[in-house]
Amino acid sequence: MLLRTENISLNIGGLQILRDLNLEIAEGKITSIIGPNGAGKTTLFNVITGRMSPTRGQVWFKDKNIVGLSPFRIARLGIARSFQITNIFERMSVFENVCIAAQTNFPYRSSIFSQVSKDVATSRKAEEILELIGLEQMKNRRARELSHGDQRRLEMGMSLAIEPVFLMLDEPTSGMSPAETAATIDLIRSVGEKVTICLIEHKMNLVMTVSDKLIVLNLGGKITEGSPEEVASDERVQKIYLGTA
Amino acid sequence: MADSDVGGRTVSNRRLIEAAILLVLVLLPLGSGRLFSDFYIALTLRILIFGILMLGFDLLAGYCGLVSFGHAMFFGTGAYVAALSWRYLSDSVWVGMLLGLGLNAVIGYVLGLLVVRTRTVYFIFLTFAFSQFFFVTANSWRLIGGTDGLTGIPAPTLVPGISLGDRIPFYYFSLGMLTIAYWVARRIVNSHFGRVLRGIHQNEERVKFLGYNSPLLIRRVFLISGLFGSVSGTLMACFQPFVPPSYYHLSLSGEFVMMGLLGGMGTLVGPLMGTAIVIFLGDFLSTWLKEAWMLCLGGLYVVCVLFSPEGLTEIISKLSATRLLSKLFGRGDRHTSGN
Amino acid sequence: MTFSTLMTVLLYGVTIGATYTLIASGLSIVFGVMGVLNFAHGSFVMLGAYTGFTIVRLTGNFWLAFAIAPLIIALLGGIVEKLMVSRLYGKDIPSTLFLTFGLSMVFSNAVLLLWGGSSYSIQLPSYFRGFINLFGIYYPKFRLFVLIFSCVLVGVMWLFLSRSRWGLPIRAGLFDLETVEAFGINIYRVFSILFIVCSAIAAVAGVIIGAMRSINPMMDLDLINVALIVIVIGGLGSFKGALIGSLILGLAEAFGAQAAPGFAKFTTWLIMAGVLLLRPKGLFSEH
């Protein structure tokens, strides 16, 4: 197991947002977390990445308890995430957006004495990423000038550029056109060959095609988990999705 | 503020302008007494001196996005420490400068631990509050002159035999210091650290989730920024042989913010231009309008905040004449400095 | 320290604190509701003092100054709000500070041009001069009036904020604009009126300070300084914070001046530093 949560609970002001979650994420697989709005999916991401502290419970990443670590420490362990709301450096070029992520792989990542212009390694890494996410044509454009879909891809590119072991994507295709979504699915698949991925998604067709495993949350608790086929045939899941629809 | 170099002027173009300005500044004393009065050298000196502080201010406010409303504390400390050392320890300018840098490094480190917990308005408040402490202390501590400040400070020497009380050596010394400061600041901006600073300005959360310890980096830039202010204060104690407590005053810190905003922050050149504008225009207006000059300067500043929040560098970069120039000079080397 | 000196110092402190409340609460409310950090608030106090001074000198009537100076400053505040401050609504808070810092420079220079650099004091009517015997404590009559008047004014503001139809949306504050809109209130009109009222109250405080202490062209910086310290202590945007902060500051000044003259300002700074270290956002911060 790459990542394992143990009885994660989160209470905010008397509300139980997460309740006793025991999840396991297998190395090398693509795991999707689904569930209706308010199920606690993004909150779970926030707890794992150190944005929020759980009221109870542990998160084990490679046999290390990461609860209580600050976000940057967790990121340095190799956990990268993207956000539900696009989270990029809007006034930097696309290239620099990727560079600022890519340079974290080198010992001079925040050095005062090294010069960006002489750093071939970061540039090469950034070019690789840009090619992977298909934004090499846009590299000198300002990030805020990109279309929404391209911005989402850029954000994924940034997460990839830190060479994570574990990539967490929060609704990577939200607001994308069908064509963009298809391209992103391909991207997730090809990345998934090397990196363990966990994603939150609403588009069921996407989830069903790319995932190795599904975890269904509702009201902060785990309903069920399993392969896409198992989950699709589960009565409780159908009830949640059809019942609330 | 602090945009990347996309679509900006080319590096070679900028180097050309930098070299031209440096040349003019180097040659300036030759014209003194012939083309214009010595007074303009004194005026330029003020720009050189405050320019150093403004470069540091820009690293913090323009690049990292944290506006300090108490930067006078580094300036004042640099001035007081140097003046005291010249009086009691040694007449070498270096001793005073290093002691000032040392104390300001301690101040920058300790206060950095405290201010790093806050952002935007609260950052402004905290820097304001701590600079208050220095003002109050300088005002009430008899040993360093109390409300009168330190007066009759002996002129330091650059090396034995060369006194910085003489205008010309001091001018070139200050120009040298500003040049070094500019070079250092430019290197910092173009370093990996500089890139992350701009990242913190635009989206600190993203920076954290990429694995950067942003509070540590903020503390670092805060300290560095203070060191620039320290050098500036030391030079001022050399320029004027007295150090009043008003070197710590809120209105001076406010003036720094004004210089930065007038010129355009996050460009290094902008705050230098802002400094030049405030000092030259201030002088011009004060001879022309007598006492009403602050009225005009304040008015100009207000108009600037309202209509051109990015400062004069933005206005200039929009002027077609400059664009033409940059096209002429920028041909051949269109690489942006970010690459 | 005998009991009567203790009571005297206490009275002085509370009186100063009450005056500071008039200044700091305006700064705090304008910040909390509108997101405008008004550095020129000290200028309004100063302009109120100078205007009041001129009115008293021309007419000899203190009460006229007390009534008309705030009206003039309210008008000025209205113009400033309409022409300049309103352009920055919704922008970042630091730029409102930068704008009003420039304005304060302009005002300070205007005062120097109009009234010169000397120090003045507003002439009090004869019945306000001298001391009064309060249960064995001799206290300046005018200060007693200031204490009572300020308490009444602060009380009215408190009632307005806690009871009136407008109070709740104002207390809901900047970060809840949608709620305010839901009350069916035109928020920009509320902003204008608030700015004007706060300017007028600043002018009232100016007349009081001008009569109690002195008027000089540097007082704007001194007072904005005090007001900033108060809201650093009390917490930005909180009326209660401004009140408590002002009282703490007034008492610290009075006792500091009594116990260690020359170090009075240190006491205020120490308090501010202590609060900042324990609660970086002030005692009663609501945001």
Image: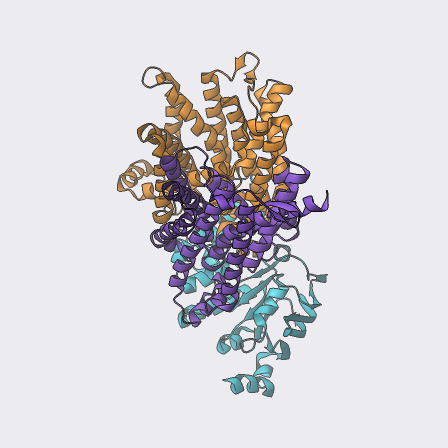
Q: Colour of chain A?
A: cyan
C197 relative to C229 in the view: left or right: left
Q: Position of residue B339 (x, y in %)?
A: 44, 45
C80 relative to B85 in the view: left or right: left
Q: Residue at x 47, y 51 (%)?
A: C37
Q: Is residue B34 visible?
A: yes
Q: Residue at x 60, y 20 (%)?
A: B86
Q: Residue at x 56, y 43 (%)?
A: B127
Q: For residue A198, which quarter of the picture?
A: bottom right
Between A53 and B135, which is closer to the camera in this rendering? B135
Between C16 and B142, which is closer to the camera in this rendering? C16
Q: Is C226 drawn above or below residue A239 in the view shown?
A: above
Chain that appears orange: B
Q: Is residue B117 visible?
A: no
Between B112 and C5, which is closer to the camera in this rendering? C5
Q: Position of residue C19 (x, y in %)?
A: 53, 49
Q: Colour of chain C?
A: purple
